[in-house]
Image (cartoon, grey):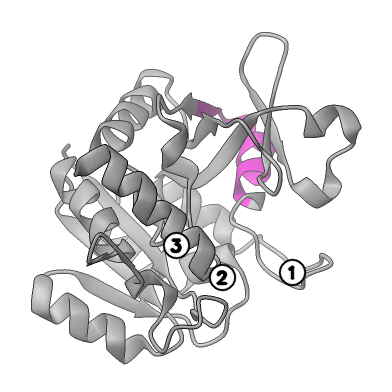
Amino acid sequence: MQNTSALILAGGEGKRMRSEKPKALCEVLNKPMLGWVIDAVKKSGIKNICVVTGSKKEFIEEYLNSEDKEIKTAYQSERLGTGHAVMMAKEFLRQAGGNVVILGADSPFMDSNTVMQAYKAHKDTNAFATVISARVDDPFGYGRIIRNNDGSFSRIVEQKDADEQTQKINEVNSGAYWFNTEKLLSVLDKLTSENAAGEYYLTDTLKLIKEEGLRVSVYESASSDTVLGANSPEQLEELNNIARRKYC
């Protein structure tokens, strides 16, 4: 895929995982979750990659140096949300141009086919941003995808803001997106942290882009596993169980 890049957000601390290393380095089938995501990006044909590090960044830098010295890094010194993490990589984005896919480092089953098909949908619909979604049996805890009557993307409603009807929606946000890089840069500076968490949300960029009258699309992944991540040792073990069933 020409003129594309990838930004992988890997600032999670790993405290809830009871790990001495950052969350992104917790392993699924003896490979760090970050490694799974990098492999999917490379397999999709994207060579220009940047990883946003945070707590204990030296562990991730050491891992990247042992795997691929071409991968760039940006450092998020404070954990102020996904939007803030992307802000830390502005220089990478400016140099990259084109279109960028933004992925979480703790989503090991975000596969290359989903990345590529979402990019095709992003281009085919002339979108300035494209959300990657999936349908899951239990959507609790996920941001819900709200569509207009014609099936187009309307907005994302987080679990804590979802009314009873919205909570029944099983199409959820994977936390992965394609963006027109220039447009993303233009709205990043408009993000505010005026919310209950005091954080800069990347999802707010979608609203800002739509307010300019520009298209935001949604691509539904064929596999519900693409949204899966881990915030506890128990969830990590479940990812390992799924991986054993899928790949062993």
**Going from the N terminus, do you reach mark 1 or mark 2 first?**
2
Three-letter code, disc 1: Ser
User: In the picture shown, does residue 229 fall above or below 166?
Assistant: below
**Percent position (x, y) of residue 224?**
47, 33
The residue drawn where x is 33% and y is 74% is: 25
Position of 220 with respect to 192 (left or right) is left
Mark 3 highlights which residue?
Answer: 236
Quadrant occupied by the C terminus = top left
Mark 1 highlights which residue?
Answer: 193
Q: Nearer the viewer, residue 75 or 99?
A: 75
- Determine which quarter of the picture holds residue 32: bottom left
Q: Is residue 160 magenta?
A: no
The residue drawn where x is 89% and y is 37% is: 163
Q: Which residues are magenta?
A: 205-218
Three-letter code, disc 3: Leu
Given contact means CB atoms under 8 Å apart, are the residues at marks 1 and 2 in contact? Answer: yes
**Percent position (x, y) of residue 58?**
30, 91
At mark 3, the secondary structure is helix
Calculate the distance from the C-alpha at mark 1 to the C-alpha at mark 3: 30 Å
**Percent position (x, y) of residue 129?**
49, 37
Mark 2 highlights which residue?
Answer: 84
